Image (cartoon, helix red, strand yellow):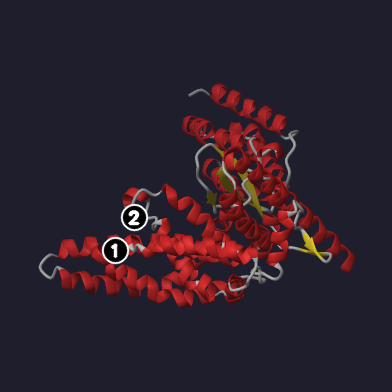
């Protein structure tokens, strides 16, 4: 690898970043990310003479394999490609819960998958420069901005699906899980390991290797369950039952119930995740159950959704897989749930779970009216999406074919408009109150 070849690639990247900096992006996350990538590449351009020749090939591969694809993701975050009506509300939630310097960069992808990178993008760029220029760490630390950029991926074809995009609550929950794992999990991880070891020692008293391997696998299973379900629980406190409805919508992609394992990256089944949210959150959510008991059209369709979910959970194949092979892991997890739910609820900065007048919002959707406010009071994102899910059930029951598609599209436009208008309304009210 020659220095000239590497330098040519850096210059090409430098020009490309300059070009995409002129694109139209809805929120500042994309612009901040581009600004910091520009700083990163400019530093490489101006300091290439300091780079040891042994690093030319490594840096060239890093640029091609990671930096360029990551910048291409940012290029896709133009306003036309993202659910922009949703982003302002999500930004507000993120800042309430994680701090004013946090931003989510929404990137569309062709895979049908939702994911978040909890590692801060700017920290990644800093650490990369530290590797190649270890003697200049002091200067490197000062050239980047102070924000934290996290990348959230969503399926491009679902960009206007306000309802399914409530799964974002789970992705934000991963930030809480990361903190929990560092702070709280260590306190009882060792104890759970001891319990598992004793359990498997008793099952295989003559075979130390089997006992050791079973314990190690058991801890990996527990780690996977905590990672996903703690994020789900956090998401419920942000988006309410919409988290359950989203997971239920996704559950049809699971052909059979599988234990968390190396093959599925230790993900618990979607069905088990729904079961936990229903048993430990929905059933204890007094206000939504009061709404469920009302005699309104809204409550009628909410009941239909809940009945479908309960019917789905009646077959306990998700539990059987644990009970037959990993009974102790399930017991350990379930025993820790009450404390986890309590801690997560306490960690949330405000109460997002509001259901007052949901039936009125439902009726307004039936009149093709946006539901951004009632009596001049802005409606929160959680309630807009929750009401949308209930009305979506009515559309599913009432229409088929093209008529169904048209009514679905009208609903999505109403919800997108509602989200954006609610955000603007809240901003003006906040401004007027100061």
**Residue at image point 57% right, 45% down:** 154
Gap in angstroms between the C-alphas marked 1 and 2: 9 Å
**Residue at image point 59% right, 64% down:** 300
Q: Which label was assigned to residue 257?
A: 2
- Quadrant where the C terminus is found in the figure: bottom right
Q: Which residue is mark 1?
A: 320
- Give the image location of residue 70, x and y in percent: 57, 38
Q: Is residue 163 left or right of residue 189?
A: right
Circles 1 and 2 in contact, beta carbons < 8 Å: yes
Mark 2, residues whose alpha carbon is within 10 Å: few (<14), some, or many (≥20)? some
Give whichever of 118, 390 is nearer the camera.
390
Give whichever of 151, 110 is nearer the camera.
110
- Give the image location of residue 342, x and y in percent: 52, 77
Residue 40 vertical placement versus 299 (above, below): above
Asked whether the viewer can see residue 120, the reply is no
Where residue 228 sits, quadrant-wise, is bottom left
């Amino acid at each position: 690898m020659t220095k000239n070849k590497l330098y040519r690639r850096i210059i090409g990247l430098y020009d490309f970043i300059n070009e995409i900096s002129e694109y139209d992006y809805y929120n500042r996350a994309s612009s901040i990310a581009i600004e910091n990538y520009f700083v990163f590449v400019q530093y490489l351009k101006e300091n290439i003479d300091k780079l040891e020749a042994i690093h030319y090939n490594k840096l060239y591969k890093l640029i091609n394999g990671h930096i360029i694809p990551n910048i291409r993701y940012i290029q896709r975050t133009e306003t036309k490609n993202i659910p922009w009506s949703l982003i302002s509300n999500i930004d507000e939630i993120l800042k309430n819960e994680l701090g004013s310097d946090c931003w989510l960069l929404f990137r569309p992808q062709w895979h049908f998958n939702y994911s978040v990178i909890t590692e801060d993008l700017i920290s990644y760029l800093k650490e990369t420069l530290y590797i190649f220029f270890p003697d200049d760490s002091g200067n490197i630390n000062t050239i980047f901005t102070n924000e934290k950029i996290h990348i959230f991926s969503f399926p491009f074809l679902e960009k206007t699906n306000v309802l399914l995009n409530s799964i974002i609550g789970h992705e934000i929950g991963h930030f809480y899980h990361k903190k929990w794992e560092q702070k709280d999990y260590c306190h009882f991880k060792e104890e759970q390991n001891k319990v598992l070891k004793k359990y498997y020692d008793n099952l295989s008293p003559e075979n130390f290797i089997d006992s050791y391997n079973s314990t190690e696998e058991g801890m990996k299973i527990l780690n996977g369950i905590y990672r996903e379900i703690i994020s789900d629980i956090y998401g419920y406190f942000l988006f309410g039952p919409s988290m359950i409805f989203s997971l239920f919508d996704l559950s049809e992609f699971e052909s059979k119930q599988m234990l968390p394992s190396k093959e599925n990256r230790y993900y618990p089944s979607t069905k088990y995740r729904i079961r936990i949210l229903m048993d430990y959150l929905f059933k204890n959510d007094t206000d939504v159950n009061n709404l469920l008991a009302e005699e309104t059209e809204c409550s009628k369709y909410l009941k239909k959704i809940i009945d479908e979910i309960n019917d789905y959970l009646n077959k306990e194949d998700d539990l059987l897989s644990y009970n037959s092979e990993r009974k102790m892991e399930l017991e350990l997890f379930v025993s820790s749930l009450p404390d986890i739910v309590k801690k997560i609820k306490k960690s949330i900065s405000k109460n997002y779970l509001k259901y007052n007048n949901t039936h009125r919002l439902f009726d307004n959707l039936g009149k093709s009216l946006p539901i951004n406010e009632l009596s001049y009071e802005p409606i929160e994102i959680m309630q807009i999406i929750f009401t949308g899910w209930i009305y979506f059930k009515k559309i599913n029951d009432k229409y088929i074919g093209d008529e169904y598609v048209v009514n679905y599209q009208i609903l999505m436009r109403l919800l997108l408009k509602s989200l954006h208008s609610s955000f603007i309304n809240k901003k003006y009210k906040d401004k007027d109150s100061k």
